[in-house]
Amino acid sequence: MAFLASPPRVQGALSNDTQLASPPDDSISSLAWSPVEDYLAVGSWDNRVRIYDITKSTNGVGLAAIDIEGPVLSCHWSRDGQKVVGAGVDKSARILDLGSNGAPAQQVAAHDAPIRSVRFFEAPNTNASMIVTGSWDRTVKYWDLRSATPAAQLSFSERVYSLDARKRLLVIATADRQLHLVNLDNWGAIWSTRQSPLKHQSRVVTCFLDATGFALGGIEGRVSFQYASQQDDASKSYSFKCHRDKEVNNITNVWTINDISVHPVHGTFSTCGSEGSFQFWDKERKCRLKEYRDVGGPISATAFNRNGTIFAYAVSYDWSKGYSHNTPNLPNKIMLHPVLADDCKPRQVIGRR
Amino acid sequence: MGKKKRGHPDVEELLARPWCYYCERDFDDLKILISHQKAKHFKCERCGRRLNTAGGLSVHMNQVHKETLASVDNSLPNRQGLEVEIFGMEGIPAEVAQAHNQRIIAGFYQAEAERRAATGNPTPGGAANPACGQPKKPKFESPAELKKRLAEHKARKAEQAVGGGSSGGNTPMDNSPMGQSPGAFNASPFPPPQATFGGSQGAGYGSFTQEPYTQPAVAYQQSYPQQPPFSGPPGAQYQPQYSPPQQYSASQSFPPGYQPNQNFPGQQFGAGSAPSSFNGYQGPPSHTPPAHGGLPNRPPSLPPAPGLPQRPSFGAPAVPPYQMQQLHQGPPPHQQGGWGGNGWKGQDQNSAMSSAYPPHPQGYNGDYSTNASLVDDLVSGAAREADDIDEIIRMAEAGIKPPKKGEAALAPAPASESNVTSAAPTATATPTPAPEVVEKPEAAEKTEQGEKKSKKEKPTKMIYSDNDLSPEEKMAMMPRYAFVPEGKTEKILVDAATVPGVAGTVDA
């Protein structure tokens, strides 16, 4: 899908990015900002979720940590900013209550295989905080935080590779390139299933700000914006190529999209790739807003803070090139990029229908 | 899509055209717009240099010629300001853009209404507007010619009765002109009314079997003068109104739009199907086409084009029997013979189609909207079918990869086939899903080969190309990351394929 003939690629400046002090020791798998304060939770392959306080200093101060027994693959904050959940290869999800003054994290979920994604959401009718976990054991389970058995469970044909929840929409991407949409008011049933428009493995799904659809990124340098309702899907969903190098000697390198984040105010999107660039996109205008290249290494995770002023991205090896490329020299850092007002603002829609 | 008219762009296209903020002209292309702006508005008078924006021009004037620029050249009086930074279509203030769009929309509909008033075509909503008169005067045939046509028609009917019915559906018409373009005035005689009906695949009518009306048709003609048969078949349609004119028009070289009964109640001629139905018919008088003798009963249906979505099949909305009577009693009595027969056939055809369309005893308007929504469904269904084809292609391609995916490849295929059949259940007759299904894999294969070729020309190297395992899974399998719960040594899954595969990924 071609983009509008837009002005030449606007390269962004990375000079103002600050680096987080005392980052984790190993690759970072996920980032999550607190919705109430500028606290950043970082999940990493060193078996920890570290929580940094960015409010006082842009280099961050370590606040708390969740230790789990295996590498952390996903972390998320609760709506009230009081709890952080981390989940990973140890097949469990643990919650740290920040108000509990140092009490260790409690395990709240268990699966048969590593948990790939975890999200907080509001339970229907009660609005109590619950978490949903998606795992490589092909199930998605809902947990209320008090009991050891899941409140409900969904089974799929393949491993869950990514999921995201926003408002009442839960999107799950599985390994067979299927996308499942669940209405959280009726969480026991899969509301709709569709084939991924990408030809290769799905890597990450992220819901739109208004939960009318989701963005899907894959390993093949392609992102798709999908709308949830059938009607919108037929007319408005589209895919586009990104994170691909310019052709050199007739070969184009195609990189994986590791994460997609939504700007909480503007609803614009960011994608990051294993070639070390992150880009901002405007879904409505179908154009790229800004591009930031060569941050120094593959970007494995990104997140906008709660008001969209800071864009955090983690530079660490994401295994895109296999075992042999994991050298000790690879950077492993978290950078905080100040988002200027215009950087991520959607372009003015010019009278096109 | 029903609305596109040749030579007349529709609203979306008009709105999408780039236009110049300064002089309110619109252009085919953004590039043309930009070069227009550079040449007319951002050009320096003194040295002829073309700048990119008004601001740029003002700076140039200041620096090079030490003059100040007051306003933009060649622009409308209210658009002369220098403060608005316009480049191509960028920078146009929202209100101005919206006002512009309103003007376009208003102008478009205005022009459309004028055109309609000028030609007298019924509005797409089927709104009857008899007040605008009948600019298309019905052309009268002389009684002799009519009788001649009637005789020919009867002869054809008799022939058909003898030849026996044939199954309506996909069989391409032997008369090539007939089969290929419903819009063409084909020479085939008898089948025309049915043929075009039956040529639903092509012409957008439901497929009809000819059997029902062969005998009854013959019988009917005799009993025409009584109207009772009209009430018999359920869900009468308007097609019968057309058929007689069609048959006669060929001999008289009537324009396709000939409607002898212009004053039919409710102007039941649907916008979409009406004109095409006319064109598809042709007069019985032309018995001459050689193929006619062969298979007169075959409806000329276009073999569904491979890869194309099914044409939406229009059926005639049901016209209550009494309206049918009126239609048929309208024209002068001597015409009725032929009309009656056709009318009867039409009804019968519709009975075949009645399963496709719910009979609407109420007025035409209701029918039209049903048709419209059905068309929309069909179109979107067709779009879905196209998407299904894409999916099949993708799945087929993915299916080339590890055989594990083969199941996944099979699963969506029947699923999408069932999607297809469910997407167009009512409007397409049963034969169509079969050729569709056959065509889709063919189309899929062709497109797939095409895609493969294009991929070979532009080799892309996927940095991470393993479709089966995510990078995290690979990492998790490594010993240093593997989760080993205390107390038992967990067998770390070292997939035999993975370890060499990990290295292999780099090489790939």
Image (spheres, rainbow, N blue to C red):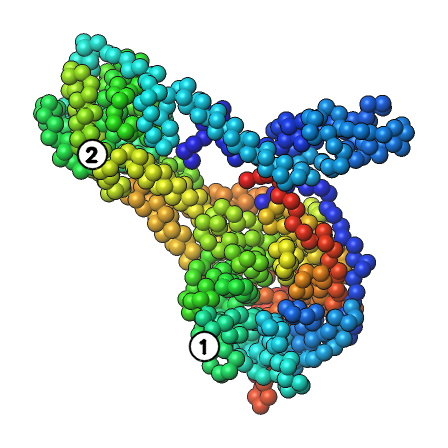
Horizontally, is B165 left or right of A171 in the view?
left
Regarding residue A91, the answer to whether it shows in the image is: yes
* Residue toward you, A219 or A300: A300
* Residue toward you, A180 or B133: B133
Q: Residues within 10 Å of mark 2 (few under 14, many from 20)?
A: many
On the image, the x and y values in percent for residue B103 come to: 56, 31
| x 40%, y 52%: residue | B416
Callout 1: SS: loop
Amino acid identity at mark 2: Pro
Relative to A305, residue B494 above or below: below
> In the picture, which quadrant includes the N terminus of chain B?
top left
On the image, the x and y values in percent for residue B240 come to: 23, 27
Q: Residues within 10 Å of mark 1 (few under 14, many from 20)?
A: some
| x 54%, y 81%: residue | A108
Relative to A91, residue B299 above or below: above
Q: Which mark is residue B176?
A: none
Residue under mark 2: which chain is it in? B
Q: Which mark is residue A151?
A: 1
On the image, the x and y values in percent for residue B145 come to: 21, 11
Amino acid identity at mark 1: Ala
Residue under mark 1: which chain is it in? A
Relative to A325, residue B236 above or below: above
Query: Residue B81's quadrant in the figure?
Result: top right
User: Are the two marked residues, 2 and 1, in contact with CB atoms closer than 8 angstroms?
Assistant: no
Residue position for label 2? B320
Query: Residue A116's quadrant in the figure?
Result: bottom right
Query: Residue B486's quadrant in the figure?
Result: bottom right
Horizontally, is B357 left or right of A294 in the view?
left
Report the Cα–Cα distance between label 2 and label 1.
58 Å
Regarding residue B461, the answer to whether it shows in the image is: no
Horizontally, is B234 left or right of A52 in the view?
left
